[in-house]
Amino acid sequence: MMNGNSLLGRCLALVALTTACLGLISCKSVTSNDTVDYKQSGAVRGPNLSYPPDLITAQADRRYIVQDGTATMSEYNAAVKKSAQLRSNVMTGIPGMRIAKDGERRWLVVEKPASELYPQVKDFWQENGFLLVVDSPSTGIMETDWAENRAKIAQDWIRKNVLGVFSDSIYDTGERDKYKTRLEVVKPGETEIYITQRGAIEKCVSDNTGACISTIWTPRPNDPELEAVFLARLMERLGMTQEQAKAMVATPLGPKTPKAKLVQEGNNKGFIELSSGFDRSWRDVGLALDRSNFTVEDRNRSEGVYFVRYVNAKDVGDSKGFFSNLFGGKDDSKMQAKKYRVVVKTVGDNSVNVFVQDAEGKPENTPAGIQLLTILNDQLTK
């Protein structure tokens, strides 16, 4: 995490270099034409994963197996270069690939098995400058590390031609993003792909004189437009032309249709009432979990259960401590994460209730249970 001293140091270095350069030239700010350009830094430790037979066949490419260890930028760049050299696995086009929409939500539907798509999606994120901190072929879930969108930094003449590489250490947007991707198999031979974004922003903490004495990282709202950008890019990666992908993603979304209601029955008992069928409710709850501070470890669609873990920011201090730990490279599973079950249960025609249970499947009739339902309800009503 960046503190007040590091932020001040970057500012002083920038002022000194800019002052020296202004005596020689004048410049005009130019903004990058691209809207996203993520640059990952640091090292991330990933789990030791292999592809189980239920998702990836025994003939799967060995380069998709993640070894236990620390992934540095040099190793990441080498992997991307190797991936580019072995591009024979890139799909040349998928009939039936389309964007599906429901109200203000959109996702990708591909007429291919998840076993064929998962390696493609994994390569896609690495090619776009991300390291994966969650890589679970057995559940079809992956999650990127936090990264900075460098396209938001103005590409002026000084930065491009004078400051060079050194400028990367002093120019910072003060924003970070991470993305979750979930592959959902609804019927044989067809896969739904969901991409959700989470954001954080660095803010100053001022003293009583108004001077910035330190900085903290706080959450910022989800950005559906960033999700749409990566859905379009993924469609290109899977064989669609850029024009076709952009046109499909750009079609207007439907009207917002509030359909969730939090029902509290006293003594910390409660549930969420959804006025929709199971398929839609299952999808909406999954997206709400992805956009919140939940980590989906497994799910059983036939029984309507998401197996999740959740890190309560209050358990690790405040939002400052929470995001400090995340940007410090700590896995949230080590930050007092607790396991729960989120149950999606049909109770009638176009009527579904959502409950929170503990790890053993017993009702979570505690203040924590109501808190988790409130978080989910907030996402479901956005």
Image: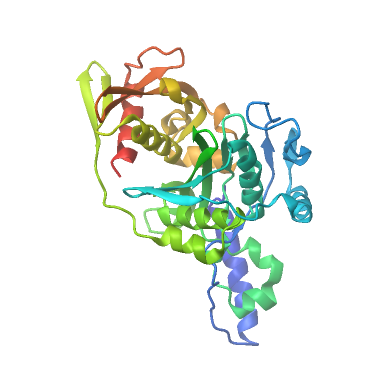
Please tell me which residue lies in front, 327 or 350: 350
* 176 over 31 or under it: above or below: above
Q: Is residue 357 left or right of residue 328?
A: left
Q: Left or right: 180 with respect to 89? A: left
Q: How is colour applied across the structure in the image?
A: rainbow
Q: Residue at x 55, y 32 (%)?
A: 332
Q: Give the x, y percent position of residue 99.
A: 45, 51
Q: In the rendered view, does 289 fall on the left or right side of 135?
A: left
Label tally: 0
Residue 130 vs residue 52, the one in the foreground: 52
Q: In what quadrant of the picture does the C terminus appear?
A: top left
Q: Residue at x 73, y 39 (%)?
A: 70
Please indicate whether residue 296 sits to the left or right of residue 156 in the image.
Answer: left
Q: Position of residue 268 (x, y in %)?
A: 27, 18
Residue 80 visible somewhere in the drawing: no
Residue at image location 68% in from the left, 78% down from the top:
161
Q: Please state the horizontal and vertical placement of residue 129, each as a whole percent of the image.
A: 64, 54
Let me know if residue 71 appears in the view.
yes
Foreground residue among 80 and 269: 80
Q: Give percent across and percent down for residue 46.
A: 67, 35
Q: Which residue is at a point 59% across and 66% down the rendered structure image?
A: 12
